[in-house]
Amino acid sequence: MTEPGAAGARTAPDEHGAPEGAARQVPRAPGACRIEQTTRLLCVAADALTEAHWVQSAAERLAATRLATLRTAAAVLAARGRPGSTGAGARPTDAWRVLVTVAPELGEWASYFEHADRHPPRDVRGVDDLLRAGEDFLITAATTVGLPAPSLPALLVPVEMSSMPVVPGELRADPGEDEITGQAS
């Protein structure tokens, strides 16, 4: 007779069918990894939007907002899966185009952010508007995939106009405004 726990000893199974003392793996529901990944991406997007609220420059706010919107799109893609081929074996590589394929109901958001990527705002108000749109997109995307939206801050720290890059020849709202500081000349 062998001792319990000795090499080669057989032990009675527990109520789940695993040998006594054996490490059991908890089964995961189908899609559990996908839900975890989607939730993580939504939270990371919310963190980037929170950072955008607190940065000191409009350029940093723009960068954090763009990152957040791309992570939000990635969360939807993680939840919905990858699209099939779009013809002749080609796959769209732009996140916004893929989003339209996978979640057509978010097509207007995809168009808006794709346009914002190509033509970024040139003033603080435009950056703040993009940030607010990013918040709305996060909430809409979370609802679309059936998850609660992460909480977002209400306070927006003001940033200075001078922190935006100046584009030569860009029209200003006020012709008497200094291009660099945004103040009256």
Image (cartoon, rainbow, N blue to C red):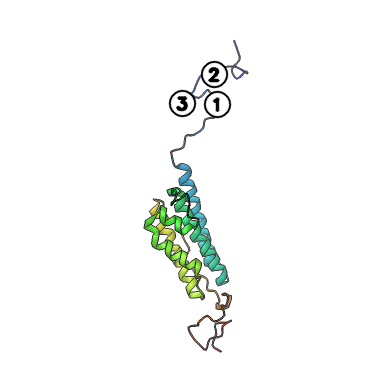
Would you say the residues marked 1 and 2 are in contact, meaning their CB atoms lie under 8 Å apart? yes
The structure residue drawn at horizontal position 49% and vertical position 48%, both measured from the top left corner, is 37
Count neighbours of disc 1 (C-alpha within 10 A) and say few if under 14, some if 14 to 19, many if 20 or more: few
Locate residue 171 relative to residue 148 in the image: left or right. right
Tell me the amino acid under the disc marked 3: His
The structure residue drawn at horizontal position 57% and vertical position 68%, both measured from the top left corner, is 60
The picture places residue 127, in percent across and down from the top left corner, at: 50, 71
Q: Which mark is residue 22?
A: 1
Sequence-first disc among 1 and 2 = 2
Tell me the amino acid under the disc marked 1: Ala
Alpha carbons under labels 3 and 1: distance apart: 11 Å
> Label 2 belongs to which residue?
11
Q: Which mark is residue 16?
A: 3
Q: Residue furthest left?
A: 105
* Residue 110 visible in the shown view: yes
The picture places residue 142, in percent across and down from the top left corner, at: 42, 54
